[in-house]
Image: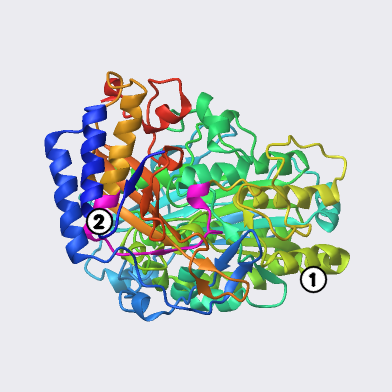
Amino acid sequence: MYRLLINGKLLLAILLVLFVYIYFSYITKHELQEIVTTSIQAEATTSREPTRVPTQRKFGVFDHECKIPRIDPFSADVMAIFKPPKLKDCVDQPDLFTVRYDKLLNQYILRFNKPLFMELFPNVLDYACVFYQIVSGPREPPSWNKDLPVACRDWIVPRHISGIVVECHEIGNRSRILQRDAFPLVQYPVGRNEKNDEERSRINPSVIMLGIDSMSQMNFQRTMPLTAQFVRQLGWYEMLGYNTVSNKVVEGMLSLLSGKFGQQWQPYCDVRRPGCLDALTYLWNHFHNSGYLTAFAEDSPTLNFTRKPVDYYLYPILEAFRQIMEGVKRVKDDYCLGRKQSFRYVLESCLQVVQRFMHETQKPLFGLFWTKSFSHEDFSAAARVDEDFVKYLELYREHGLFKKAVVILFSLHGQRKGPLMKLASGFLEERLPMLHIYLPPWYRKQYPEIAHALDVNRRRLCSTTDLHLTIKDLLLHAHPNLDFEIVCRSCMSLLYVVPRNRSCAQASIAGQFCACRPCARVPESELVQLWAKIIVFRINQYLYGKNHVRQCHHLQLERLLTVDHEEIYNVEGQMVEPVDGTERYQIKFITQPKAVFLGNIFISNKYNFIDVPQQQILRLDAHGRCLDESVAHNLCVCRSSL
């Protein structure tokens, strides 16, 4: 194990670097001089570590194996950069067209407001209105018929249509579009057994999942206080120990839906290749096989399906809307789609599903409704939709959602970039997504042990894969004879009490995402730059020692991404010095040639050494393989891949 002596005896450190250079002959003169120069500058200008301040903390999880602090969402450093944006409107005029549902006909009716048209366009005498009807088959992607004329009166929409785009333009000047609007439609299903559906809905809880991308527990309280207040009502349970399993939304979504980790599906499935994801088994498949109607809606693409995976699949319809209204070329900003914010299509789709199959006709339902367009890029941006999000929750309540369904409001990870990541709380903001689970009154009464388990588990460590098992267990309670594939033996359903002293390894949470060893983000400095260069040097030294120079590039530090300092707490929750005097830092950085690494570096003041174990240097970016040895493969930037 490579150890570099440090403290006031800087000469020993320089001599050791020289010794390693002579022994391995694998570090350039420029690189060596840079490390030595940085060492001298850092020793002269920077203290070796942050000063510990004895602090009493509140914790979401606090046991022998796991301690996760509760961070103040409104701390001064966060509020200094929190700038809630105003709600961005996509249009500045009222709607000419509206859609309503006729319960007697079980069909939608498109209405044109002619008096409003005359008011908005008094000088337009000759105009025409046309529509595009979008048809989505059981397997095929949506297709549409163009330029079908629509009369300026109510039009009963046929049941085979999954969506419509309607526009009015000036006759003689087709390029002058007076108004264009789009409507996805949840059509009543054909061939369902109404009696069986009603019987299933009495014993099988419907499950509705509402997801918000890149939303941590803290940022949820900060940016969406009205929604946060809504989920504090009776029946809701907030999982304070919910820990991400990946900071990549695709990997997190697949862990949630399939229960499988990246290493289980990546060898045979490249998510960038169309069709590979169609072969996996997802939560909605289990619910479909148990007689449920299924729905999946998202406003920005996450999973690349080529076949229709559920009964109601929204995104291809939204993509058809984009092609009709904006052309084939994809726009960068997904916030608006036509006259509406993109997230409204998702929440409206959920509202239609709830209206059709909970309020009007009893049918068991599983639906996942995922929004990304307002929360992914800017940590403050969710503040502008908070009021509207709560309005939709209130509409869902009016239509009986919270009387009949288990509702899950969740995210998969927190923010991964931006100004929030530079704050001391950035480490936990990234690793602690929000998770709120609601049980309807009848379910709490019928299964009091489940309500008790969720109450206890509020302060127990859990993961996305635990949530996967929890949703499966909702089916098992109604169908105890179901047999599911075991994809994670150490994961646990939250419908049972999770034991105390659970480690991240037992929850199948990889070390780089584990919040149980809490860290505080520290600012960059010349000394930290030196530590990152030592980690890079350690990578080069290891690969040279294994004789992999021909296969692997020699690396140099390009820039730091994050630096996190581990905090140690005693049984009273006070921050204390490590018993052995060794401080641990996690440093995430980019090298040249391009690669992203996370390295652990251990600093001991007591024994005056730096320890950089190569087993704790992780490669974070996707990369090819040119070596068989697992450690070397993890560290190697293959020459053949560039």
Q: Is residue 517 magenta?
A: yes
Residue 185 x/y as whole percent: 54, 52
For the residue labelled by badge 2, is the local secondary structure a helix, a strand or a loop? Answer: loop
- Way the structure is coloured: rainbow
The foreground one among 192 and 24 is 24
Examine the structure image and report whether residue 280 is included in the region drawn in magenta.
no
Q: As drawn, is 207 to the left or to the right of 142?
A: right
> Residue 14: image x %, image y %?
21, 46
Question: Under tag 1, what secondary structure?
Answer: helix
The kind of residue on which mark 1 rests is Pro
Instruction: State whether residue 90 appears in this view.
Output: no
Classify residue 356 by image quadrant. Answer: bottom right
Check contact, mark 2 vs mark 1: CB within 8 A. no
Quarter of the image where the C terminus is located: top left
- Residue at image position (54%, 58%) is 211
Amino acid type, label 2: Lys
Q: Magenta segment range? A: 511-531
User: Looking at the image, which residue is at 44% across and 73% down?
Assistant: 223
Residue 627: quarter of image: top left
As measured in the structure, the alpha-carbon distance from the residue carrying label 2 to the one carrying label 1 is 68 Å
In this view, 317 is above or below 413: above
Badge 1 is on which residue? 441
Image check: 59 left or right of 532?
A: right
Locate residue 338, reporting x and y percent: 35, 56
